Amino acid sequence: MNYNKKSIEDIQVAGKRVLCRCDFNVPTKDGKITSDKRIVAAMPTIEYLVNQGAKVILCSHMGKPKGEWKPELSLKVVAERISQLLGKEVIMASDVAGEDSKAKAAALRDGDVMLLENTRYIKGETKNDPELSKALSELADIFVNDAFGTAHRAHSSTAGVADYLPAVSGYLVQKEVSIMGKALANPERPFVAILGGAKVSDKLNVINNLLEKVDTLIISGGMAYTFLAAQGYNVGKSLVDNEKLEYCKEMMAKAEAKGVKLLLPADTAVADSFPNPIDAQLAVDYVDCTAIPEAKMGLDIGPKACEAFAAAAKAAKTVVWNGPMGVFENPTLAKGTIAVAQALADSEAVTIVGGGDSAAACEQLGFADQITHISTGGGASLEFLEGLELPGIACLQDK
Ligand code: ADP
Ligand code: MG
C-alpha cells in the first residue's frame, strides 16, 4: 500500500463543500458524552477547514444502530460539543444524506459547519451501498477521511463515497499513515516490535508480517506461553493455544532464517487462577518461564523480562508496541505493562502504540504524552501492522 497520501493541505478547500468523515463514536451515558477525546482530536481538521473558508459537512457513526433510528445514538450531543469547542453554531441535519441534509448543505456559507446524523442509521452504510455513497457524495465537492478507527472498514462514508469525489486525508489520518507507514516501509533501525495481549490467534498475521520488517520481535503477554509450549516447556495452567503450536514453531524458524532476534520473557508472575481484576490483594510468585509450576498460571512478565525488554526498547530507533504484557487490569499484574510503557516513554526512539488495550493502558498509566504516537484505531492499527490495505486509506489520492 502507498502511504504517501494527499491531505487537506494538498487540495484547494476554500469555498468548496467538504464532506469530512470523523470518528465521533464517543461513549455516552444518560444522553451525556462521558469522554469527548475523539471530538477534541478531530478539532484541528475541522478548524483548518473552517479557517480556510470551506463549507464543512461532518459525518460519523456512533454505536451500532444497525439501520435503525435509535434516538439514543443521535449525533445531536456531538454537534453541541463541537459547537462549544469551535465557538460557533454547528447545524444539525435530521437525516444522513436525505432531503434535510441536501437542503442544509446547499444553504451553507463559507466557514459554516454542519453535521449529518449517525451514518449507521442507514442500512447501506456498513454494506458500502453505492446508493448511499452516491447520495453522500452529492452533498459535497471533496471527501476528507479523518476517521482512522474505521479506516479498515469499506463502508459508504469511509471509502465508498471516494468513488465519486476527490478524496484526501485529514490531520488525524495523515498522522497515523505517515508515522506508522514510515515505521513499516522505511524504519530507522534497530526496529523493535513488542507484541502482547491475550491470544496468538488474534495476531497471527501481525507476527508474520513484522518478522519481515523488524530487527527484534518481543512476544509477550498471554501469547508468550504458546511460544514457550512450542519450545517444549511446561507452562502449567497458562493460556496456551494448542492449535497454534505448529504456527509458533514456524515463526521461530522464520525469525532464525531472517536473522530476527525473537525474545520471549525469561520470567513470569504466576497465580493459582485467573484473577479478579479488582482483587488488589492478589498473591503472586515470580518464577522462570522454564520452571512454571504445573498448578500455576502465568499472568504477567517478571522483573528479568522487564529489564530485557526495556533494554531492547532503549537501544531501538523505532519501537512498535501492541498488546499489554500481562493482565494489567489487575494492579498487581500491571507491572510488566508499566515497565514497557516506561521504557517507551524514556526511549529516544520513535515510539508507536497500537491496539485498544495497550493504548488505554498508556493513557491510564500516564505515559501518553511521552510516546510519539498512540494510534486512535485498535482494529485499524492491527490491520496496518498486518500489512493489509485499509480501504479508508487506499481510497485517498496519492501524492
Ligand atoms: P490490544 O487491545 O492492545 O491489541 P489485546 O486485546 O490483544 O490487546 O489483549 C489485551 C488483553 O490481554 C488484556 O485484557 C489482558 O488482560 C490480556 N492478557 C495479557 N496477558 C495475559 C496473560 N498472561 N494471560 C491472559 N490474558 C492476558
Ligand atoms: Mg483489545
Image (cartoon, rainbow, N blue to C red):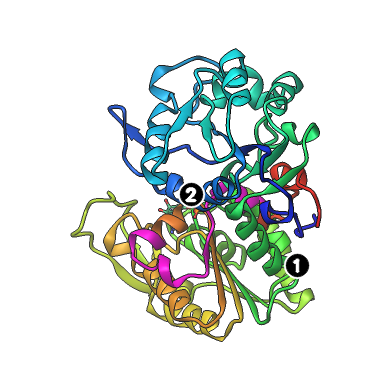
Is 95 or 327 nearer to us in this picture?
95
Number of numbered tags placed on the structure image:
2
Q: Is mark 1 within 8 Å of ligand 1?
A: no
The type of residue carrying mark 2 is Met
Query: Looking at the image, is mark 2 or mark 1 nearer the viewer?
Result: 2
Quarter holding the N terminus? bottom right
The quarter of the rendering in which ligand 1 is drawn is bottom left
State the mark number for residue 185. 1
Q: Is residue 350 left or right of residue 39?
A: right
What distance separates the C-alpha of mark 2 from that of mark 1? 29 Å
State the mark number for residue 43. 2
Magenta-colored stretch includes residue 62: no
Percent coordinates x, y for residue 159 in the rendering:
71, 36
Percent coordinates x, y for residue 119 in the rendering:
57, 26
Residue for point 39% across, 69% down: 336
Measured along the vertical axis of the image, is residue 384 above or below residue 230? above
At mark 1, the secondary structure is helix
Sequence-wise, which precedes: disc 2 or disc 1?
Answer: 2
At mark 2, the secondary structure is helix
Is 295 or 287 nearer to us in this picture?
287
The type of residue carrying mark 1 is Ala
Residue for point 72% across, 39% down: 142
Quarter holding the C terminus? bottom right
Q: Locate residue 153: give its quadrant.
A: top right
Measured along the vertical axis of the image, is residue 276 above or below residue 217? above
Q: Locate residue 238: give its quadrant.
A: bottom left
Measured along the vertical axis of the image, is residue 360 above or below residue 219? above
Q: Is residue 131 left or right of residue 317?
A: right
Q: Which residues are the magenta region? A: 362-383
Measured along the vertical axis of the image, is residue 266 above or below residue 243? below
Q: Is mark 2 within 8 Å of ligand 1?
A: no
